[in-house]
């Protein structure tokens, strides 16, 4: 069935449309069949095979795995099959994936122009530093002119840039050694906890982990599932090792008598406000609503964090490139102005 992989955008759009049709009262088979009419012949063939698998009793999340769908989306479908809020879960999951895909494209688009400028500036720098600047420096020295600030900047950049490259290579090598000999041997939960400590990226990961866990728990609780039963469902979801391990770890600690908010406070991959939300929801008897609200809050905060980070990255890149280009030109032009003043 898999010859042409579904893109993330195709996967999310497909599940969003399925969710919309389910919300209007369509059975899932009719929803898939209706959507297939708007797709290519190849996709129609794939979805026809899906319908056959569904008629045989294969769960929808297993069918999606056969199609090569992303594990996050399969996870949404898996939990939706347990709690019954199928349409809402599909709409929520597809919205999140589309949001992540949009942010990734925005980041790549933002970096395309600066990367092109850096490449062109690099060639220009090599040409000036290797060809023009040495000749002008020789001329200026013969006339008794001292090197100006911008000339010193160019030579300093030439001196320290290779050191920076070597340092970066050393860091990457150490990281690779650590990954292969230590990081891979850690549990999934410990791996994610280490990644969550990375500045900016770690905060985004914590928001994503908190959002996913809280919204799935909210849907399960809304469907009449208890917290203990929900954790068992998390544990059985082997396609997502992180949440499977989370369910197992939280359930184990609950059996020892620890409170849920205390357990979550000790898990670093969650937002620090998460345990307080859990405690407040348990006290007012509206835990599923509190979790749903907080999951949406996490997405809002994540969007703002990404937007602010992108706003900082681009000006810094442009400032660095502009300063280097100006330095290259002034390193040559300023001494020439001194020569003209002396004529």
Image (spheres, rainbow, N blue to C red):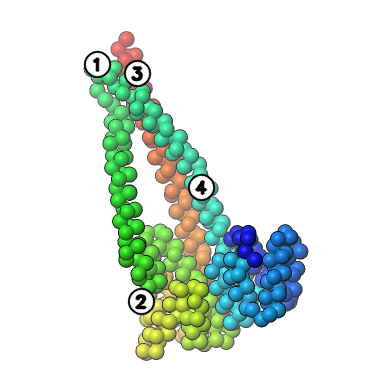
Q: Position of residue 197 (x, y in %)?
A: 36, 64
Give residue 110's mark: 4
* Residue at x-position 23% and y-position 17%: 144
**Left or right position of 283 against 19:** left
Label 3 and label 2: CA atoms lie apart by: 65 Å
**Which residue is under mark 1?**
142
Q: Position of residue 25 (x, y in %)?
A: 73, 77
Between label 3 and label 1, give the one nearer the viewer.
1
Secondary-structure class at tag 1: helix
* Residue at x-position 52% and y-position 55%: 104
Nearest to N terminus: mark 4 or mark 2: 4
Are discs 4 and 1 less than 8 Å apart at CB?
no
Nearest to N terminus: mark 4 or mark 1: 4
Residue neighbourhood size for the residue with mark 4, other residues' Cα within 10 Å, grouped as few (<14), some (14–19), many (≥20): some
Label 4 and label 2: CA atoms lie apart by: 37 Å
Secondary-structure class at tag 2: loop
| Residue most extreme to the left | 144
Give residue 266's mark: 2
Q: Quadrant of residue 223?
A: bottom right
Q: Quadrant of residue 67?
A: bottom right
């Amino acid at each position: 069935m898999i010859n042409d992989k579904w893109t993330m955008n195709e996967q999310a759009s497909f599940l969003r449309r399925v969710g919309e049709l389910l919300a209007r009262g369509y059975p899932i088979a009719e929803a898939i069949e209706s959507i297939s009419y708007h797709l290519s012949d190849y996709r129609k063939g794939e979805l026809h095979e899906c319908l056959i698998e569904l008629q045989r009793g294969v769960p929808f999340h297993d069918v999606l795995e056969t199609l090569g769908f992303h594990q996050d989306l399969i996870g949404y479908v898996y939990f939706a099959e347990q709690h019954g809020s199928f349409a809402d879960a599909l709409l929520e999951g597809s919205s999140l994936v589309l949001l992540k895909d949009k942010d990734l494209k925005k980041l790549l688009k933002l970096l395309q122009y600066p990367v092109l400028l850096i490449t062109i500036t690099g060639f220009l720098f090599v040409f000036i530093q290797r060809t023009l600047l040495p000749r002008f420096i020789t001329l200026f020295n013969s006339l008794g002119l001292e090197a100006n600030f911008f000339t010193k900047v160019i030579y300093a950049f030439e001196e320290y840039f290779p050191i920076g490259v070597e340092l970066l290579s050393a860091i990457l090598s150490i990281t690779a050694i650590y990954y292969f000999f230590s990081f891979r041997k850690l549990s999934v939960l410990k791996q994610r906890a280490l990644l969550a400590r990375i500045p900016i990226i770690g905060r985004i990961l914590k928001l994503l982990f908190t959002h996913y866990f809280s919204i799935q728990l909210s849907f399960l609780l809304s469907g009449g599932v208890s917290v203990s039963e929900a954790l068992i469902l998390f544990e059985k979801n082997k396609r997502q090792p992180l949440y499977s391990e989370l369910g197992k770890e939280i359930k184990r600690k609950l059996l020892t008598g620890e409170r849920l908010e205390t357990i979550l406070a000790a898990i670093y991959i969650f937002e620090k406000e998460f345990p307080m939300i859990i405690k407040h929801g348990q006290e007012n008897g509206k835990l599923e609503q509190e979790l749903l609200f907080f999951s949406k809050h996490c997405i809002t905060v994540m969007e703002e964090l990404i937007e602010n980070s992108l706003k900082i990255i681009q000006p810094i890149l442009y400032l660095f490139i502009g300063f280097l280009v100006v330095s290259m030109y002034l390193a040559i032009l300023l001494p020439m102005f001194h020569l003209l003043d002396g004529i």
